[in-house]
Amino acid sequence: MATRADIEAGQLVALNRLLGEVRGRNPFYTQRLDSCGLGDTVESLQAYSAAMPFTTKMDLVWDREETAPYGTNLTYPLSDYSRFCQSSGTTSGPLPWLDTAESWSAMLDCWEQVYEAAAVDTQQSIYFAFSFGPFLGFWTAYEAATRRGNLSLPGGGLSSMARLQAMASHRCEVLCCTPTYALRLGELKAEHSADPDLDAIAVKKIIVAGEPGGSIPEVRARLSDLWDGAAIYDHHGMTEVGPVTYEHPDRPLSLCVIESAYYAEIIDRETQCEVEPGEKGELVLTTLTRMAAPLLRYRTGDLVQKSYLHDGLCLEGGILGRIDEMVVIRGVNIYPTAVEKVIRRFPEVAEYQVRETTSQSMAELQITLEAQPEIADPEALAKQVQKALQDAFTLRIPVSSVASGVLPRYEFKSKRWVKA
């Protein structure tokens, strides 16, 4: 088993290979390397972190606006690029991204580790309940599965019911989708439990990504219950960097960084220094193998807690929240993930929505929830959730209920927070 020193030595070799490849070829990073005085190689990871400035999402947005449509962060001639994806547009709008065949293959290698950690063997069939739009995660997950030899079924362009029927017809054992959509499919399966066409559903493992829910115990328990005891595996990545983490079987509810492909730092937002194990900070990533459009010290905006497992870097509790999504309500810092953790303690809640409003220059939250159809007293449930939120945050957040089927359902990333 590799020691911490072995891991970092390998990362330094990969980093120097990356620096040598991009300098003089990639206009975006050649200018940055020149300005900070870094050469083709660095003596240590620490020297690199001390000299190299951060890259931010807005740096990428501005670069693409100035040199539309793809910007200057391209290491090779445009004719070498064969893959197009774009970010989901959670912040600053969709961001286009290009890859060469080599960089694309490097990301498939990362997904291979996700499947291996979940003990998905090549004899298991995998159903991909995605729309197969331009978002990166769908395509890399699917193509990595086909490359390793799994029977891979794309679920694009189908209704939720048609997807359930396809899983049953083809005896799919593994499901890949977002946590929100896995909940939706599971609830729909429960609603049609008397349908003999769905009796053959045999999903044993669910790999989720795209939202923090996969590392929230209450969400995982609900998913496993809906899917007859299926094992839940979390993973996370971004269009800008690719697949970053996997869930190790020895450390459920944590995500292990694929350190052969990423040099990860976890920094204090104020001091911008590396935090100690057990402390929380922002995840900063350098892509070591995606050389076609690399990112050096990219501030992801993800709030994580640093830990180690078998000398490998782990994110305890997964992605704890997005730093740019934190709201301050009457002096209390609240992350959407923290609210979801409380609400998901109640399996009676089918769906919810949070409205963020401003009154007299102060932010306020109001929550609307939709109870499961069999719940006789939704208002009583709303009061229970409101009390749980008050106990968690020492803050009164009004909670009300609406009729079944009123709140929207999501196939991809949920949009439960609405700013009014």
Image: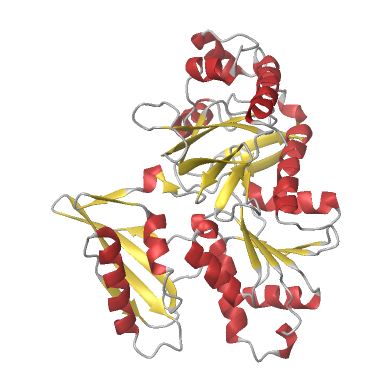
Answer with left or right where residue 143 lies relative to residue 136: right
At 42% across and 26% down in the image, what residue appears? 273
| Residue pictured at 52% horizontal, 55% vertical | 211
Q: Residue 410: tell me if it is visible.
A: no
Q: Is residue 207 visible?
A: yes
Query: In the rendered view, would you say 169 is above or below 325?
Result: below
Locate residue 353: give its quadrant: bottom left
| Residue 13 figure quarter | top right
Q: Is residue 184 above or below residue 235?
A: below
Q: Residue at x 66, y 35 (%)?
A: 98
Where in the figure is residue 246, as x and y percent of width and height?
A: 64, 48
Q: Quadrant of the C terminus?
A: bottom left
Q: Which colour style is shown? A: secondary structure
Q: Which residue ends up furthest to the left in the rendered image?
A: 360
Locate residue 258, reporting x and y percent: 65, 39
Q: Quadrant of the N terminus?
A: top right
Where 400 sits versus 250, above or below? below
Can you give x and y, in whole percent of width and height, for residue 55 in the image?
49, 27
- Please name whichever residue, 403 or 62, is drawn nearer the observer in this view of the structure: 403
Report which quarter residue 357 is drawn in: bottom left
Where residue 149 appears, as percent x and y from the top left, is 86, 54
Numbered disc total: 0
